[in-house]
Each structure stands twice: as structure tokens, then as C-alpha cells.
Amino acid sequence: MADCPNEVRNRIRVGLLTVSDTCFSKKADDKSGAGLRALILDDRIIPGVVEVQQVVADELLEIKDILKDWCDSLKLDLILTTGGTGFAPRDVTPEATKMVIEKEAPGLSVAMIQKSLEITPMAVLSRLVCGIRGQTLVINLPGSAKASKECFSFIAVAIPHAINVLKDEHGEVASVHHSMQRNRCSHDEDSSCKNQTNPLPTSFGLRDKLCVNQTPPPQNYRLYHDSSQGPNQDDHIEIPPMYYGGLHYESHVDTTHVANRARQSSYKMISVESALDIILAETPVAETAKFKYSECLGYYLAEDVFAKEPVPPFRASIKDGYAVMSRDGVGKRLVIGSATAGNTSKTRLESSYCMRITTGAPVPQGADAVVQVEDTELLKKANDGKEELEVLIKKSPTTGQDIRPVGADIPQGEKILKRSQRLGPSELGLLATAGVVQAKCFQKPTVAILSTGNELVDPGDVLEHGEVRDSNRITLISLMKEHGFKTIDLGIAEDSPDTLFTKLSIAISEADVVVTSGGVSMGEKDLLKQVLEEDLEAVIHFGRVFMKPGKPTTFATIDTKHGRKLVFGLPGNPVSAVVTCNLFVIPAIYHMSGCPTPRRTVVKAKVDRNIKLDPRPEFHRVVLSWGPGGVGDDDGLPTASSTGNQQSSRLLSMQCANALLALPPHADGRSLVTEGEVLDAILIGNISSM
């Protein structure tokens, strides 16, 4: 499959240079470079393509040589550097840039700093330099992943026009100037310029197959990022409505002959079990990477982990008391000092002496036992009780008493964690204890969420006749975040092949998994399957599942040069979307993340009432609960209580639900499940005693 549908000429050729000692030495991940790359590939900021990306140490001449080579040999249109622009002694990116550029472009630097000052006063410490060498524009950006993306977004609207000017594209330049002149406010007509928006440049040579959305940038435009731990920083990206340089792909799907549309689905109906088997068989496991141990919460290990050193690394006292020589038995001891946790005494203990010691402190040389303070008596003190001189040992100690030997908890070289093990809080603590500061883990996939439908509007919009608020998107995004997965919010797509093609193309370029809701049934506006097959060359593995709710659930894969992408087309009804996401999408993402057991947990539960059966297997929303004592009845099974009306459009049926009760289909004369029957319940939420 072609990486970019409808091949586009005249894209801005971009080079990304991360300047960082720590990234260059692999001690830190290049999050800034990755973030800028994602922003470029988004095609919403500028119509660009990243031709080269590199990490370099904070070395003046090396930075200069790379910039010069990219300008003169590669002849890139745009070079973005990130990092090395602060006050630190090794921050030399601006100096290297000045050695390369022939003209400065201070307006770009001023714009970035001015807008940054609205966010943080620390922007005054930035030394960003922008300039031109030949036909290449060079822009310094901050080293922070967040700040670099923000600063680039501040000036992105001017970049295509600047490149056109540098390349002497007379037609494009004249078009922009004409547009600006035409949209300029006339002082004579309205000196206040009310309701006048800033004019936008025309496209950067994106003619014929591509068009530019001429909507002005919203006042609150920005990329939104939720903070989370480690590699999950920038956990959620919300792509705002396009305001410049947006690509509009033309679909091959013909919607004009509505009378000729299919009246029956061409997709075979398969069981839920078969559908899940297909999904897991077609889902690849993500690549691996090394992460700092403190950033690995929720990740799955890609290799066994062995202790680098013994725990404890010294003989440690188990109790507060006195370090002694066991052969001295009971009797008086002279106190010669103390050993506390974190401090090592170099004093060697001799017979008839003892040393005060605290829990966790190293046992001094010569001592082979610790006597707890409760088994001693103070005989002499000095300095008004500030110093102990002599104590009585009342119980005879044994060799090794209350001492943890070296490696007693974890011997050096012992396997402490296994491949495919999930790293939770305790596992991270174990890594820290054993001195393992980096762990090789399977990377977590990024999930793009898209709602489809002409009737949908954002929750904050005023409803017009026939419109409904989009609840699926926030529900699915929240479900992903609840499981610790990164998300991209693609907004709402109207029921148009071109719009779907464009949105899905963006999703596939940015995410590993694409989840859509709506557009998969048999209506004349249900176009997702056609766009997937005809425009994106996707392989649709199934398009109907024998279940309720969720019958039209669709699963497809798209193989790109960046790996296989998964596409889940979920039904548009809110409950159907949540149920199928839990049954199919969540297991697939866990499998991709390296989880060895990705299927949802199933428990047995007793039904608390009679439930009428449907011709299809139904996943009934229930609340599982145990009695006050922690168990239901003598059998210890939880009770499954229905959440009420199970209509697929009624999102209230998901409220408080922590399980899906797997009801069998109406068959062989059996029409209902009776109270007290035991059925399988698939866990989808937390379990608590009622």
C-alpha cells in the first residue's frame, strides 16, 4: 500500500535535529524529536515530510557540520533543532546556528518567545535563533517535548509561505499576498475591524488532489497532553480542527448510486470466540525499547531481569539493639559507639564490647549477633543521658541472631522478574532494590479514536434538530486511558468518503490501532468498510459477529512500511461501542503490549433474576457483588445484578457495570435464564463488596 494516498508533490522537506548529551548517550529517550515528527506527519500543522532525523551531542562543531550538510547537500526546505538553547555551559545550539545561517529571521524567534511568555515567565531564558542559509530555513526550538511542539505551533502558519518565498515560488507568493490584501480590514469601512479573522495563506502547492481548509485558527488552538508516568507522558493528544495545510484525500468510493447498494451483508457471521481468535492471530506484538525503571509502570517486560548486586549488599541488622559477639554470652558490655542505617562504622568489635545498632544498619566487623533492646538493661550513662556507657545483656545470643546475611533477600545474579511480566508498583520497587535502573519492555501502542456520523456534535455544542451529542469518543478514550494506553482524539468525521479517507489516513500515520464508532452497518451512509477496502487497501477479516449488542463489529488490518495497523469499526450505539471495545479492542491492545494473557478475565456468577434470552448470544451488563462477609452464599460465588433496560443506545445500562454476563442464545426451546443459574461473567471493572 502506498504510504501516502494520492501522491503529493511540493511537500516541505524537513530535517529534525535533537541536540542533547543524554539522548545521544542513550540515557534518555528523544521525546522532543519524536513529538515534532508526529506533528509534521500529522499534515495539519504544515504539509511536510521528515526526510532526515538525527540526535547529536551538545558539541558546537558537530552541530554546525550537520546543519551545513543538511542545507548544502540535502538542500532541505526546513530544519528544526530542539535542545541546547538555554543558559547551561553546553547549550551551544544558537551559536552553531549562527555559524551556518546567512540571514537571521528574528521575527520567528520573537513570536515564539512572546507566545511562550504567556505560558511561563521562564521563556525569557530561551535563546532561540532562526535564520536562512540558501533556500533552507533553520529554526531553533526548546528542548522540552511540550515546549518544542508549542513553539512550533505558534509559527507554523507562516512556514509554508516562508518556504515559498525562499524557493521563489512566484505564483504561490502572489496568491498569498492577494489573499491577505483581499481580506484586510478597510479602515474607512470599519475602523474597529469587528469580526475580522486573520487571513490565511493558500496551500503550499497542494493543488488538484488536495485542498486547504480555510477555517481560521481557533483562539484556543493547541495540542493537549495529559501528564502521566514516564513513556506515557503526552498520554492523550487531541487534534484540533484543521486551520491550515490540511490534506483532503479524494476517495474512490462512489455514493451516487444509492439504489444499487447491497441489501444483504456480504460478510459471514462469526462467533465471538472466532472473532477474538482472528484478532489475536492477526495482531503483532510491539517492538521493544529500554526505559528508565521509574517510567515503566504498566509495561510488560521483554526479557528476564537479573539482580545486578545482592540484597542486602551487607550484613544488616533486623532489629534495634546492640551488635555483639555471641561467644561472650550474657553479662556486662561496654558501649563503644553506634551503627545506624546509612552510616558505616569502621570500628571493629572486640570481646566484652557492644555497639548500638538500628534496624537496617550494617553490622560492624567482629560482631556476629544482634541483641534486641528489649533483652538489655542500661547500667551506666553519661552527659545527662546523651551517651550510653555500659549495658547488661540479659539473654545469651546465638551466632547470626537477627542478622540478614549478604544476599539473604536477593542473591546477586538471581532472576527477579520474568519476561512478559507486568510491571506494577511492587515490581518497580524490586527493580530499584536490585539496582536495575533500565528495563527492556514492549512498547505500548498508540490508539486513535474517531467518531463518525453527520448527526454528531461535540458535547458543548447547542443541539439542532436531528443532532445528538457524541458520547462514544470520550467513553472510548477514557477506557483506553483507564488501561494506561496512549490515545489520539481524531474528533468527529461526517459520513463522507473523502472525510473518512482523510481522517483514517491521519490515524494510520500516527497510531498503531484505530478505533472508530459508527458507519459499519447497512445504511446508505455506512461507508467505513468501503473506504477501508477501496482507498486504504485494508484486509477486512470479519464484518459481522453473532452477538448482542455489536453485530456489525468490523476488524481490519493495514500493512504499511511502518508495520501492521489495526482498525476496529465498532457500532455507533453507545453501549455496543463500549461492549465490543471491552471484548475485542482491549485484548488486542494488551496482546500488542506484550501481555501473555490478553483475554478478559472470566468468573462464574449467579443470576439474581429471570432474564429473557435473545436469538443471539447477549452480553448483559451486570454488577457483581458479594455479601457483607465477602462471599455470596456457601458456594462463594458473586451475584450478578442486571443494570436494567439493555437497549444498545441506553448508556445508562453501563453505569456501575463491572461485568458482562454471557447469556446463551435462545435455542432448543429454552427462552430464559432463571434466577440462581450460574453463568460466565466477563470482568470489565473493579470488584467490591456491597
Image: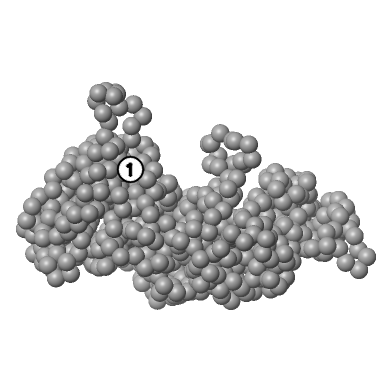
Residue 131, position as x, y percentages in the image = 13, 52
Instruction: Give the secondary structure at mark 1.
Output: strand
Can see residue 297? no
Q: Quadrant of residue 78?
A: bottom left
User: Residue at left 13%, top 48%?
Assistant: 105
User: Residue at left 49%, top 63%?
Assistant: 251
Mark 1 nearby-residue class (10 Å; few <14, some 14–19, many ≥20): some
Q: Quadrant of residue 90?
A: bottom left
Label 1 sits on what residue type?
Lys
**Where's the C terminus, which quadrant?**
top right
Residue 607, position as x, y percentages in the image = 82, 55
Frontmost residue, 517 versus 386: 517
Frontmost residue, 511 versus 633: 511
Q: Is residue 265 above or below residue 204?
A: below
Frontmost residue, 132 versus 407: 132
User: Residue at left 42%, top 50%?
Assistant: 239
- The residue where tag 1 is placed is 381
Residue 348, position as x, y percentages in the image = 27, 63
Can see residue 261? yes
Coloring scheme used: one colour
